[in-house]
Image (spheres, rainbow, N blue to C red):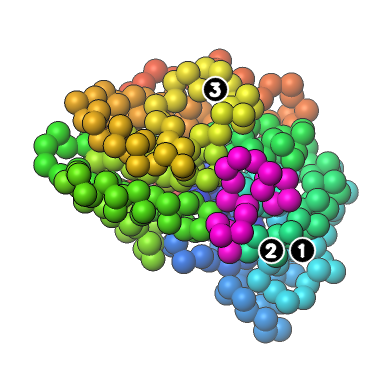
Amino acid sequence: MRVLHAPINVGNQPWVLSRYERRLGVESELHVNYATGFGYRADKVISQNGGKSAADLRERLSAGLKSPWDFDVFHYYFGRTLLCWDDYVSGDDYRYLDLKIAKHLCKPVFFTLQGCDVRLAEQSTKLNVSPCRTGACGIFADCLSRHDARRRQLISEILPSADRVFYLNPELRRYVARGEFLPYCSVDIENIAVHPPKREGPPIIVHAPSDPSIKGTRYIVEAIEALKRNWDLEFVLVQNMTHAEALRVYQTADLVIDQVLAGWYGGFAVEAMAMGKPVLCYLRNDDLTYVPEEMIADLPIQNVYPNYLIDGIAAALGRRSEWTNWSQRSRAFVEKWHNPRLIAEAMIALYNNPSATFTIMDYIREHRIERRNAPITTDLDVDCA
């Protein structure tokens, strides 16, 4: 079985999943149309970001049109395939042609949705808290005027042709009724050591926004500045770093604040919990019905509301005597619910039988492994191919 993950590496999800599929004996590759500034890895980078030369176009077309014959299973991300070029002025004539060819050849197709690929701004803005509003997301107006129409087309015309559709953020279930919840498997937890919070000295609070506007960074910074009047603490804002550089900063954290607008935690929180860090994040209660009750019961993240961030962060700082236990629960949660080996096993079973009735979460519940001590390693950029 040859599995293609494509066409973009958002949050390292496709890379880690493909590496664990390889460990389990599957020929799994990640091909991306272009690299991003985070330094995430891929087996093949087809061309440069924004390149519009004849050579770039030729490489993109060749990669997209050959893929249906070169691979047996296709796992696409962020609502795109190899022939969807968000960085090109033109190219719409080829959109999803590789997907259509793959389906004509009766080959399985999977999508993992990750956020703004299907989040309809017009609907999301009606929620009590959302990144989709003026003053939060910088492209909100463009989403209303242009992007929502393309998202609706993706939902109504493209996703129905997929064998399975997964979503990482529970809110996305509002827009894709047939989607299945998939926990992040973006962290190679077998190669990340635990770095528990220190018990004394000024605590270090870390926040690492990939996009400050939709993560609510402004509100977090304002709350921290207010807290500094009464608390001796250090705040580290991680930006403009490669993924490997950022991971080394995360090791130093005593407390982590993920995001406070989206209503669910992201890959950064999973990385932090894998290191044994206490994590704060806004969790939208109405969306928790789309996540298994057992997972919510185990969830160690402290829910903080954007309008009460100062109180929420202060409450976490006041629980410092509990941080050691909180650290242990964070690591255990990731090993149980975000275990890439277990998720890769379940995914391979679905690749072999896309019409199977079980979900990824069914598989995790039935096959979850006992918690193991984290390997003693500080190499956080391991190529596990």
Question: From what the image shows, is residue 292 above or below residue 106?
Answer: above
Residue 184, horizontal then vertical, whole percent: 52, 38
Looking at the rendered image, the disc whose residue lies closer to the viewer, 3 or 2, is: 2
Residue bearing the label numbered 2: 141
Of residues 93 and 4, the one drawn nearer to the viewer in this rendering: 93
> Which stretch is magenta?
121-138
In the displayed structure image, the side of residue 269 where residue 145 appears, left or right: right
Residue visible at 46% across and 66% down in the picture: 37
Looking at the image, residue 223 sits to the left or right of residue 217; the answer is left
How far across and down, in percent of the image, does residue 221 sit?
A: 36, 54
Q: Give the labeled residue for mark 1.
A: 145
350 above or below 306? above
**Would you say 26 lies left or right of 68 here?**
left
Kindly check if marks 1 and 2 are in contact, taking CB atoms under 8 A apart as contact: yes
Three-letter amino acid code at the position of disc 3: Ile
- Give the amino acid at mark 2: Ala
Helix, strand or loop for the magenta stretch, by majority:
loop
* Residue at the left extreme, as displayed: 201
Q: Quadrant of residue 301?
A: top left
Q: Is residue 130 magenta?
A: yes
Q: Which mark is residue 364?
A: 3
